[in-house]
Image (tube, rainbow, N blue to C red):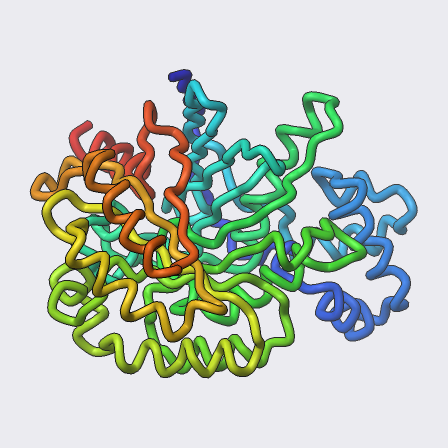
């Protein structure tokens, strides 16, 4: 494991990041500020095609327009605090926001390209008992500009190496519940998916939710996006799921699947079910059969992703399922005709679990 640390300083910055504007919003802003529409198009091109690091580098804009941009926006609001690189090529970034709070971003090298996992909240209030993200409660939502900036900084590292590499896939599965920060998440998706910018294909983007406000899943069905939807499920019945995920108390499986069924009927798009394998908790053949029974009526548009658990020091009661238990679980699903896979692991030699690096750094700072 390689780890690089940098000193990041808290600033009193209050200007929003220009990355938070969709192309249409940037055009509206330009017109409202007595600028021609094509000026906004030029700015967009500088931001996402040429990927400049300051407004001053936008050489076809007037000094007055650049001053106007600087007065109302910053470009990248994140400062790099720590980079950890795994032996398998996974890279975990710890970024500091302008108010001094910290978030994590992860780059994973896949056979099909470079995938980045982004964070949408500072901390998390969903209360999943196995997850490192919720160790520190939610402080605030991450703005659309701060989410886009995570992608831009990872891409900047590629650009600086002079190699023709690009972020090709996005998973919105980092710290926080994306549907609890819905408007910022949707703006982010429109920015990165825009054909005139980063042009990351909608089918290369996945958003994960634990089922917070199932009606948001129904709203998502009408966004007109071909984005993939993943559900953090982790249990096939309410008693077990409630013991693992506090959100299930108010949003039990019946409510959740009512909205999932609405989503699939509306979009005809497949849903991925994320299932973390916890030894002796949710990994028995009997529970696998329960899961199969739950998914089977929906199997045409369903895919189960069995995930090896990354142990978290604060959650010592949970251990990773053995390979044997995982494969028996997998076999039960396959025998029932369920589309499923065991997820490939990434970053097991670094702070692999989502939120671990952030939690560790905050604890260090507290002790210092």
Q: Is residue 363 visible?
A: yes
> Can you tell which quarter of the image residue 215 is in?
bottom left
> Which residue is pictured at 21% across the width and 65% down the height?
290
Viewer-nearest residue: 143 or 242: 242
> Can you tell which quarter of the image residue 26 is in?
bottom right
> Where is residue 73 shown, x and y percent of the image?
65, 55
- For this orientation, the residue located farthest to the left is 317
> Where is residue 241 shown, x and y percent of the image?
18, 64
* Image quadrant where one finds the C terminus: top left
Q: Is residue 59 above or below residue 304?
A: above
Q: Is residue 285 above or below residue 37?
A: above
Q: Is residue 82 above or below residue 120?
A: above
* Image quadrant where one finds the N terminus: top left
Image position of 169 (left or right of 217): right
Q: Is residue 141 visible?
A: no
> Where is residue 74 shown, x and y percent of the image?
63, 50
> Which residue is pictured at 80% across the width and 39% down the height?
57
> Where is residue 161 shown, x and y percent of the image?
68, 21
> Which residue is pictured at 15% across the width and 51% down the height?
284
Q: Is residue 203 above or below residue 269?
A: above
């Amino acid at each position: 494991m390689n780890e690089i640390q940098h000193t990041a300083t808290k600033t009193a910055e209050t200007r929003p990041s220009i990355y938070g504007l969709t192309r249409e919003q940037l055009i509206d802003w330009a017109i409202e500020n007595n600028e021609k529409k094509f000026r906004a198009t030029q700015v967009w091109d500088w931001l996402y095609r040429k990927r400049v690091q300051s407004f001053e580098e936008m050489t076809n804009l007037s000094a007055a327009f650049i001053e106007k941009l600087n007065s109302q926006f910053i470009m990248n609001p994140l400062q790099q605090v720590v980079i950890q690189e795994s032996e398998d090529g996974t890279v975990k970034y710890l970024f500091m926001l302008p108010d001094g709070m910290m978030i994590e971003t992860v780059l994973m090298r896949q056979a099909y390209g470079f995938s980045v996992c982004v964070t949408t909240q500072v901390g998390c209030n969903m209360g999943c008992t196995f997850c490192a993200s919720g160790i520190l409660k939610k402080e605030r939502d991450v703005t659309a500009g701060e989410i886009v900036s995570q992608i831009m900084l990872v891409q900047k590292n590629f650009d600086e190496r002079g190699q023709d590499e690009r972020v090709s896939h996005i998973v919105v599965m980092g710290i926080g519940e994306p549907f609890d920060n819905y408007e910022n998440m949707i703006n982010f998706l429109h920015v990165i998916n825009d054909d005139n910018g980063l042009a990351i294909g909608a089918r290369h983007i996945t958003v994960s939710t634990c089922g917070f406000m199932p009606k948001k899943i129904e709203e998502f069905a009408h966004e007109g996006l071909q984005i993939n939807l993943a559900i953090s499920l982790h249990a096939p019945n309410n008693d077990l799921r409630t013991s693992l995920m506090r959100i299930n108390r108010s949003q039990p499986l019946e409510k959740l699947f009512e909205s999932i069924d609405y989503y699939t009927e509306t979009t005809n798009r497949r849903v991925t079910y994320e299932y973390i394998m916890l030894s002796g908790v949710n990994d028995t053949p009997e529970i696998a059969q329960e899961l199969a029974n739950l998914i089977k009526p929906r199997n045409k548009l369903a895919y189960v992703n069995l995930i090896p658990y990354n142990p978290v020091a604060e959650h010592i009661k949970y251990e990773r399922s053995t390979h044997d238990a995982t494969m028996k679980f997998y076999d039960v699903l396959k025998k029932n005709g369920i589309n499923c896979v065991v997820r490939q692991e990434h970053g097991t030699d670094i702070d692999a679990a989502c939120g671990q690096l952030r939690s560790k750094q905050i604890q260090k700072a507290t002790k210092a």
